[in-house]
């Protein structure tokens, strides 16, 4: 049987099992109406650590975009314990689908093309750079058969071998200027991706048809950034850096349904470890780049009510960007894009610890994290 057919069958089985698991009535349940609600984050709780991460060192990995380095932080001491060079222009650090590798996406430019640097999470050390064209960000197909490079400058998605990075095929997205961040529908049948520049705000990509099937224009022009699906799979949350908040998009109709004001320069989204809250990193500025010491903050949205239930300013100013939470859920780690710092934020009190790193820290990741698989970005776990 060919590798292509094997991958397709694996994908079919994965989606079928996922769908059945989400809909099946538990043992002893006689009334389908009594079935527990869907929770796509049911496997990211602290107790759901995969055997694949058993030997991973507890570390925070920070890509410093303008330093061309990665800072490695020990979360127990809040100290930088290592710094090493990677490729040119590192943007995000992405856990692989199988949880065995951390990939640094180095965008470089259209002349030098870019690269991916693998990091072994068991040693915390990098391997050799692999040339890859314009890897702004990276996601994975749900069956793990492809890494999806978000080639922002080329307005396309390049599907590549998840180990060798050899090109498999490409999905063009010419209507999406500044194609950026992504998330999947609950059944994995489609992806949505933000378009940072231009008229179109969000696109929908049919994964089976391998094409862009629709585009959405928000009610207020802006700069869409990160996107994350609600636990029940019904709503996509999309940050907008110019509109200082989060747009809500119905996943079934692909229509805008609401807006939640958060803070200046709303940018990154992180789900709490219990899957009940959404942390919004507000950069404190509507411009890119900008000076340090802005009015950065973190807003906490409760999924059940779509209300902001906490607002945590960065003391002395800052620019919280993207990151993730620790395995126990007690700390939220975010890069301070304009301040050369990262922030360790207590998820109970909002208290902030600042750690100095390189220039323009961006999409950091916390590792290890619970979950069955990584869909990409800085740890979009399911």
Image (tube, rainbow, N blue to C red):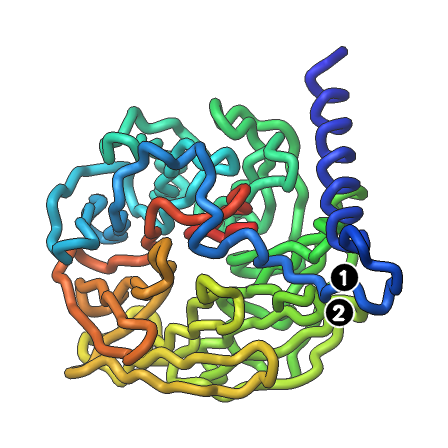
Q: Residue at x 57, y 27 (%)?
A: 167
Rate crowding at label 1 as few (under 14), some (14 to 19) or many (20 or more) other CA atoms within 10 Å.
some
Looking at the image, is 154 positioned above or below residue 40?
above
Secondary structure under the numbered disc 2 in the rendered image: loop
Q: Residue at x 22, y 45 (%)?
A: 70
Q: Which residue is mark 2?
A: 254
Looking at the image, is 3 positioned above or below residue 60?
above
Q: Which residue is mark 1?
A: 214
Q: Quadrant of the N terminus?
A: top right
**Pointers 2 and 1 in contact (C-beta within 8 Å):** yes
| Residue 347, quarter of the rendered image | bottom left
Q: Nearer the viewer, residue 158 or 263?
A: 263
Q: Nearer the viewer, residue 324 or 265?
A: 324
Measure how far apart labels 2 and 1 are at the Cα level: 9 Å
Q: Residue at x 45, y 85 (%)?
A: 262
| Residue 360, quarter of the rendered image | bottom left
């Amino acid at each position: 049987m060919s590798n292509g057919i094997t991958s397709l069958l694996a994908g079919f089985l994965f989606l079928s099992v996922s769908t059945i698991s989400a809909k099946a009535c538990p043992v002893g349940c006689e009334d389908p109406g009594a079935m527990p609600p869907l929770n796509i984050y049911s496997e990211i709780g602290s107790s759901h650590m995969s055997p694949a991460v058993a030997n991973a060192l507890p570390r925070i990995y920070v890509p410093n975009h303008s330093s061309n380095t990665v800072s490695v932080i020990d979360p127990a001491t809040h100290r930088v314990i290592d710094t090493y060079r990677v490729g040119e222009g590192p943007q995000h650090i992405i856990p692989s689908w199988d949880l065995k590798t951390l990939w640094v996406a180095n965008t470089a430019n259209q002349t030098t093309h870019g690269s991916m640097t693998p990091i072994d999470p068991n040693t915390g050390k990098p391997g050799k750079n692999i040339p890859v064209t314009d890897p702004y960000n990276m996601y994975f197909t749900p069956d793990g058969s492809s890494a999806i490079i978000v080639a922002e400058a080329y307005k396309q998605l390049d599907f590549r071998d998840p180990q060798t990075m050899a090109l498999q095929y490409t999905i063009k997205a010419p209507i999406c200027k500044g194609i950026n961040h992504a998330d999947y529908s609950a059944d994995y049948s489609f992806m949505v991706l933000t378009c940072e520049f231009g008229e179109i705000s969000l696109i929908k990509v049919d994964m089976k048809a391998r094409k862009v099937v629709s585009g959405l224009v928000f009610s207020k022009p802006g700069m869409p950034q990160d996107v994350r699906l609600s636990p029940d799979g019904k709503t996509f949350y999309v940050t907008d850096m110019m509109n200082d908040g989060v747009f809500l998009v119905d996943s079934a109709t692909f229509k805008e349904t609401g807006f939640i004001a958060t803070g200046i320069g709303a940018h990154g989204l992180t789900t709490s470890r219990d899957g009940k809250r959404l942390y919004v990193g507000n950069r404190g500025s509507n411009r890119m780049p900008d000076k340090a010491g802005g009015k950065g903050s973190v807003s906490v949205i409760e999924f059940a009510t779509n209300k902001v239930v906490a607002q945590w300013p960065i003391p002395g100013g800052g620019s919280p960007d993207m990151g993730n939470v620790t395995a126990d859920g007690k700390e939220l780690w975010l890069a301070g894009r304009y301040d050369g710092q990262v922030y360790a934020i207590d998820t109970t009190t909002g208290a902030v610890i600042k750690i100095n790193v390189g220039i323009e820290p961006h999409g950091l990741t916390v590792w290890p994290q619970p979950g069955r698989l990584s869909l990409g970005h800085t740890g979009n776990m399911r």
